[in-house]
Image (spheres, grey):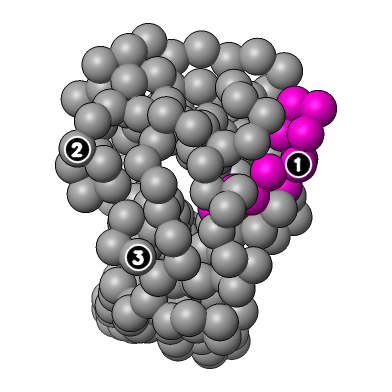
Amino acid sequence: MKRKPLFILLTFIALSISFIANAQHPIVVNNTPSPINMDTQRSFVVVIPQTHLKEVSRAWQKYTSKGSKGKSSQTDGVYVQAGEVSKNIAPAPFNLYSRLVETKEGVRLNVWLDESSPTTVPNSGQHLAVQKYVYDFALLQYRDAVKEELKTEQKKLHELEKDLAHLIRGEDKSSNAISKNERATDRANDAIATNRSDIEKSDEKISDQKDNVERNAADYNAAKGARKTLGELEDDKKGLQKSNEKQGKSIDQMNKENRASARSIASAQENQQTKITAVEQQKEVVRAVQTKLAQIKYSAIIPQ
């Protein structure tokens, strides 16, 4: 590269292309002195917010090499694109030099042209075309970064909404379990009531059969048959009693489950309120990023 690029003759009055997507992230392209190799030359400088060096470097090489007549190279952090073609800047191919550095504000891009570029003067169409060339790239990268930001925030919202839906399903599941157990408890209580009635009838039958056994005590065969019938009646009564005991334990277990489900419902409802707040807050974040993306437009060239 020549020690003095042609636009060293440009005025010290900088021109900038300004874009405000929001108050925190303006895009400004300035024409200022910047060091390159062992010299300091005027370059077009822009900081691209929300971007990272790897992605921007790859995009910049693709952007500058499109339609170029020469090869690209890189030495000591300076990227050189020979035979750059941009009819808006110059009718003939020219050489373009650039450096990309990642900063905490975003990637800083410096662009220099050499003496093979056409003569440009402040506020001339060619000078503004170089600014626009750099600005267009920065704008595209910033838009892509904000699009990625939007995807990230939308994904967060989606995950929060999934969590909320999971809590609601959990509450519904617990409510359904309580209802199911309540219906089963009602059936168990009905069965217990029926068994109690049958047990009372069994008691009467057993009492009568005991009298029958005593009446037939002298008759071996009759007494044997009466005792067998008495045993069967007593076994039936025991079966009814065991059934009621089993039904009672089942009711105890269902009541225990219902208490646990009630606690789960209370916890789910409390967590839902927290999650609903988080969802609404994240919706605001998504809307803010959508607004920022929608506001990204080309600005006019404003002399400074």
What's the residue at 39%, 58% (across, down)? Answer: 127
Q: Which residue is mark 1?
A: 40
What amino acid type should be assigned to the residue bearing mark 2?
Pro
Given contact means CB atoms under 8 Å apart, are the residues at marks 1 and 3 in contact? Answer: no
Q: What is the span of residues highlighted in magenta in the rendered image?
A: 34-46
Mark 2 Cα-neighbour bin, 10 Å: few <14, some 14–19, many ≥20: few
Callout count: 3
Is 301 placed above or below 153 here?
below
Image position of 43 (left or right of 117): right
- Quadrant location of the C terminus in the rendered image: bottom right
What's the residue at 49%, 37% (across, down)? Answer: 113
Earlier-in-chain disc, 2 versus 1: 1
- Residue 91, labelled with which disc? 2
Q: Is residue 36 visible?
A: yes
Is 90 placed above or below 300 here?
above
Q: Is residue 263 magenta?
A: no
- Residue 140 location, quadrant: bottom left
Q: Which residue is mark 3?
A: 124
Residue placed farthest to the right in the image?
A: 38
Please tell me which residue lies in front, 171 or 119: 119
